[in-house]
Amino acid sequence: MKKILIPMIVVVLGLLLLVACGNSGDTAPVKKSVAETQKAVAPADSGTPTKTVEQEVTEPSSVQKPRVPEKAPAGTEPVAILQTKYGDIEVAFYPHKAPNTVKNFIELCRSGFYNGTRFHRIIPGFMIQGGDPNTKSGPEWTWGQGGHTDAAGREITVKAEFNDIHHARGIVSMARAADPDSASSQFFICVADAGQLDHKYTAFGRVIKGMDVVDKIVHAPTVGGEKDREHSRPKRPVAVISAKIEYRPIKKAVR
């Protein structure tokens, strides 16, 4: 019995070792270093953004499907209220054109993510850009590089939902890097026609009240000089004091 038992134990141990090695190889995360273009939209007279930031990403991809927010009461649809010192900016959505982008934006509003963020990039005749968490407390050189991240610090992005909505005055769209699927939390509001962005950025909403507020923000003085060669960083960036979601009758919202 002893002669038979010992070989059997050796075989069993060997099988267990093979299984353990195989599982380890399947679940080991693979990290790679990538240069991600600054989250920004290109101004009408320029090419792609030039600032970069190095970040570590863990595969599989950090592109995740946004959690589904609570359903709107029957006969209503959501409207975002962005409170600023100049007044409120009200945004209605196009869920039939960009469903996941709308869900992502609504969820970020509900969670308080946008509270305290600033409009860090303003270009008269083009747009205002905000939604970067770095603008709450991070150094100014990081503004435009932040996004929504998970508990592990990985950026949560939403796949592009390019559609036929024309980037006209009042349209709200997602800022992104060179990768079409890199939109996260940063967004911009057009102050004039920006048709060059059509089918390249995900338009998902429209300002239904408060364009006078947007106009005040976009015409604020900028820093300029070596620190602001684009002349788009406001000297006193306007903050989103709070962002909330209200439900209103569908007939009062823009479809």
Image: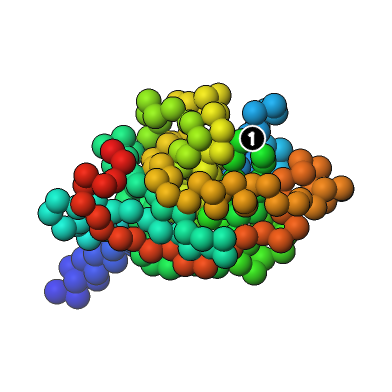
Quadrant of the image containing the C terminus:
top left
User: Does 198 sit above or below residue 161?
Assistant: above
User: Does 8 sit above or below residue 125?
Assistant: below
**Res 244 quadrant in image:** bottom left
Which residue is at a point 34% across and 61% down the rendered structure image?
245
In-image side of 80 versus 251 (left or right): right
In-image side of 92 versus 243 (left or right): left
On the image, the x and y values in percent for residue 210 come to 48, 51
Q: Which residue is mark 1?
A: 125
Residue that lies at the very extreme toward the right in this rendered image: 226
On the image, the x and y values in percent for residue 147 come to 53, 55
User: Does 5 sit above or below residue 67?
Assistant: below
Which residue is at a point 21% across and 65% down the rendered structure image?
8
Which residue is at a point 55% across and 24% down the rendered structure image?
196
Q: Residues within 10 Å of mark 1 (few under 14, many from 20)?
A: some
On the image, the x and y values in percent for residue 237 come to 67, 59
Total labels: the figure holds 1
Pick whichever, 236 or 2, lies toward us.
Answer: 236
On the image, the x and y values in percent for residue 144 come to 63, 51
Q: Amino acid at mark 1?
A: Gly
Residue that lies at the very extreme toward the bottom in this rendered image: 2
Which residue is at a point 29% across and 46% down the rendered structure image?
253
**Res 162 quadrant in image:** top left
Pick whichever, 189 or 226, lies toward us.
Answer: 189
- Secondary structure under tag 1 reads loop
Quadrant of the image containing the N terminus:
bottom left
Task: Judge whether residue 160 can be spotted in this image.
Answer: no
